[in-house]
Image (cartoon, rainbow, N blue to C red):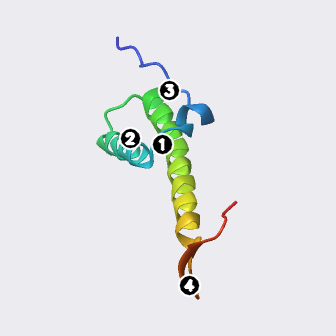
């Protein structure tokens, strides 16, 4: 009889300081694991939940980066930054 690994709980604090690259790496690992199909149902559900939270986190980080890039505008005196918030 096998025991399931403890279900991963994901909170916003858990992901808050996670760099984009690390979150993306974790998400890619989860996708590979789910595609492999060797997890128990409970493990697959926990991985899916974690993957969903990581996807949202990555999307937020990308949106933040896009806003920063868009804040760089070319003005009469060359490139300048405008406030983003």
Residue 74, x across and y down, in percent: 55, 83
Query: Real-space Cα distance between discs 4 and 3?
Result: 51 Å
Name the residue at the right extreme.
85
Q: Nearer the viewer, mark 1 or mark 4?
A: 4
Residue 8's disc number: 3
Residue at the spot x=48%, y=27% of the render?
Answer: 42
- Residue 75 vs 17, above or below: the answer is below
Task: Compare marks 4 and 3 and give the one earlier in the sequence.
Answer: 3
Task: Compare marks 1 and 3 and give the one earlier in the sequence.
Answer: 3
- Residue 31 vs 64, above or below: the answer is above
Instruction: Give the labeled residue for mark 2.
Output: 26
73 or 45, nearer to the observer = 73
Name the residue at the bottom extreme.
76
Query: Real-space Cα distance between discs 3 and 2?
Result: 13 Å
Label 1 element class? helix
Q: How crowded is mark 2: few (under 14 residues within 10 Å), some or many (20 or more)?
A: some
Q: Nearer the viewer, mark 4 or mark 3?
A: 4
Instruction: Give the labeled residue for mark 1.
Output: 51
Task: Compare marks 1 and 2 and give the one earlier in the sequence.
Answer: 2
- Residue 7 vs 62, above or below: the answer is above
Residue at the spot x=56%, y=84% of the render?
Answer: 77
Quadrant in which the N terminus is drawn: top left
Label 4 element class? loop
10 or 21, nearer to the observer = 21
| Cβ atoms at labels 2 and 4 below 8 Å apart | no
Task: Compare marks 2 and 4 and give the one earlier in the sequence.
Answer: 2
Q: Residues within 10 Å of mark 3 (few under 14, many from 20)?
A: few
Instruction: Give the labeled residue for mark 4.
Output: 77
User: Is residue 11 in sight in this rendering?
Assistant: no
| Cβ atoms at labels 3 and 2 below 8 Å apart | no
């Amino acid at each position: 009889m096998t025991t399931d690994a403890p279900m991963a709980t994901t909170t916003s604090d858990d992901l808050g300081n996670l760099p984009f690259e690390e979150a993306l790496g974790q998400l890619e690992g989860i996708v590979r694991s789910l595609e492999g199909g060797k997890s128990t149902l409970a493990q697959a559900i926990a991985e899916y939940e974690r993957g969903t939270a990581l996807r949202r986190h990555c999307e937020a980080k990308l949106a933040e980066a896009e806003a920063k890039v868009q804040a760089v505008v070319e003005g009469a005196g060359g490139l300048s930054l405008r406030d983003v918030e």
